[in-house]
Amino acid sequence: MKLPDNFTLGEGATFQGYEDGYHPFMRFKTRHEAKVGARTAIDGAYFNLGEAAHLEIGDDCRIWEAFFIAEAGIKVGHRVTIGWRATIVDADFHPVDPAERLKDAVACSTDPGDEKRRPFDSRPITIEDDVWIGPLSTILKGVRIGKGARVEPGAVVISDVPPGARVLGNPARVV
C-alpha cells in the first residue's frame, strides 16, 4: 500500500493494512506532515484528517484498527498502546439540533458545490507517554490524557484524565 507523501514513518516503524477494499487514507486531506515515530507498529488504522489537521504519533507505540478523526489535531506520546476500534475524534462534526443536523447530512452527501457545511467546534487531543487505551473506547475533543493513564475498554472520555489515573464508563470517570 502506498502511503501519502506527507505521512512519514520513523525508523523501524511499520504500517499494515488489509487487502479487501480497505483504504486507510480515503479521507486523509491534511496539508501538514503526519509523523509516526520510530519502531511504532500500526495495524489496520484509519486516518480521517481535515486539511488543517495535525497528527503526531510517538516512538514505540502499538495501534490496532483505531480511528483517528481530526480537524485540529491529535498528538500521541511515546509507548502508547491503542486497542482495536478505539476512536480518537477532535470535533463534533455534526450539529445537535435535528433540523441543522439534517442540513449537514445533506451537505455531506451531495456534490461539494451544492451545500456548504457549517463550522463546528474542534479542539486538539493530547495523549501523553505510556498511556493504554482499551478497545472500543472513544476519546473526544479537547481531552488530555496524562502520562501513564489507563482508559478501560468502551470508555467515553469527555474530560482530561490525570497522570496515572484509570478511567472507565460513559462518561469516563476516575476509579
Image: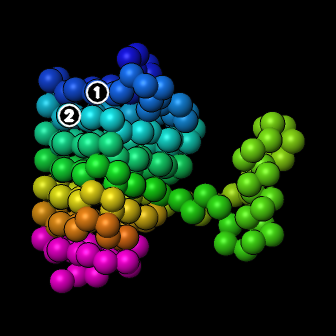
Q: Quadrant of the N terminus?
A: top left
Q: Is residue 14 magenta?
A: no
At 15% from the left edge and 24% from the top edge, which residue is drawn? 12
Specify whether 118 is left or right of 40: right
Classify 122 as above or below 71: below
SS under mark 2: strand
Calculate the distance from the C-alpha at mark 2 to the C-alpha at mark 1: 8 Å
Tell me the element at label 1: strand
Above or below 55: residue 74: below
Residue 6 in view in this figure: no
Render colour scheme: rainbow
> Picture coordinates of residue 54 (x, y %)?
44, 43
Residue 118, quarter of picture: bottom right
Q: Of all residues shown, which one is farthest toward the front?
A: 20
Measuring from the top left, give residue 93's x and y in whole percent. Answer: 61, 58
Residue, disc 1: 16
Total marks placed: 2
Q: Give the mark, 2 or 1, whose residue is nearer the N terminus.
A: 1
Q: Amino acid at mark 2?
A: Ala
Q: Is residue 161 magenta?
A: yes
Write the residue at 33% across / 62% down: 137
What's the magenta region?
158-175
Q: Quadrant of residue 110?
A: top right
